[in-house]
Image: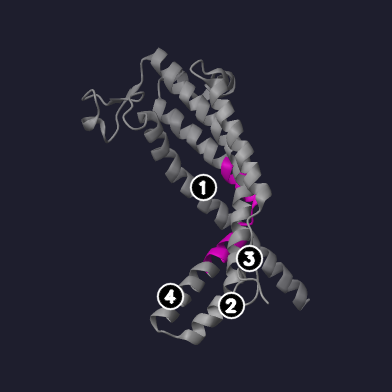
Amino acid sequence: MADAGAGAGGQQPPMPDMSNMWRMMIIMILIFGLYFIDGSDHIIGGGLNTVFQIIDFSGEFPVVTLMLMGSIMILLSSVIRTLMTDTLEQQKAQAFSSAFNKELRQARLDNNLYKVKKLMDMQPVMMQKSMESSNQMMKSMPFTMLIVVPIFLWVRYFVDVTLVNAGTQVISVPWAMYAIPLSTAGTDITWSFFLPAWILVYSLISIPLGQIITRLVRAYQFKRYLAKMEAAKTEEVA
């Protein structure tokens, strides 16, 4: 008799890769350790400043520095993800999952029990593809965080030490009129409400840059994939 937890086709649902979960837990512990070590003395951030001070411009252009550091962080993390994951396979898995869910919803709306049963029989395959894609992302995440967290700690040092010493922590931002204390000149980048203002500024800069760089990397990978297919087709003809 088939196990009660088996899928409609008699297949067991795929189990998550526990090694990846343990790796994530270890890396998160290390990240908290880095924050603890860095502390209010900015031990790690200050150490990294010996390298990154070439782009701090002595605190005179804080937004430019944040843009440059955001670009560096996104570029490095994108390269790591590209080297450790198959972007094309991930896109295929996402397209497969989206198409499957759409067909299943339509079959249920149409009350097409035969089609629902056939799709449910295919569900273990869909789940396996989705799990493989998730495992690939989890494999690259710890290494990405090892790049992101130290850079983040340096940005915190740049804001708390370099900008404060230079007296240039007040910048113009769209929400300056709502900031406390009110200032027609801008807002204090060290001011905090639910998040420090510098984190909001850094996120607003790095997220769009990340989207652009990611799309460029994917376009490059797809171009290489098409070139390989074309080369293989040429060899077959020859």
Q: Amino acid at mark 3?
A: Leu
Q: Is residue 222 visible?
A: no
The structure residue drawn at horizontal position 39% and vertical position 80%, both measured from the top left corner, is 109
Q: Amino acid at mark 2?
A: Asp
Q: Secondary structure of the magenta portion, mostly?
A: helix
Residue 74 in the image, given as x and y percentages of width and height: 53, 41
Closer to the eye: label 1 or 3 = 1
Picture quadrant of residue 126:
bottom right
Q: Nearer the viewer, residue 58 or 50?
A: 50
Q: In this figure, which residue is indicated by the disc labeled 2? A: 121
| Image: 40 above or below 137 | above
Which comes sooner in the sequence, label 1 or label 2? 2
Outermost residue, front side:
1
Magenta region: which residues?
A: 77-95
Task: Give the CA separation, mark 1 to mark 3.
Answer: 20 Å
Closer to the eye: label 4 or 1 = 4
Q: In this figure, which residue is indicated by the disc labeled 4? A: 105
Secondary structure found at label 4: helix
Which comes sooner in the sequence, label 1 or label 3? 1
Q: Amino acid at mark 1?
A: Ile
Secondary structure found at label 2: helix
The structure residue drawn at horizontal position 51% and vertical position 30%, both measured from the top left corner, is 152
Which comes sooner in the sequence, label 4 or label 1? 4
Direction from residue 49 to residue 237 in the image, left or right: right
Task: Give the CA separation, mark 4 to mark 1.
Answer: 34 Å
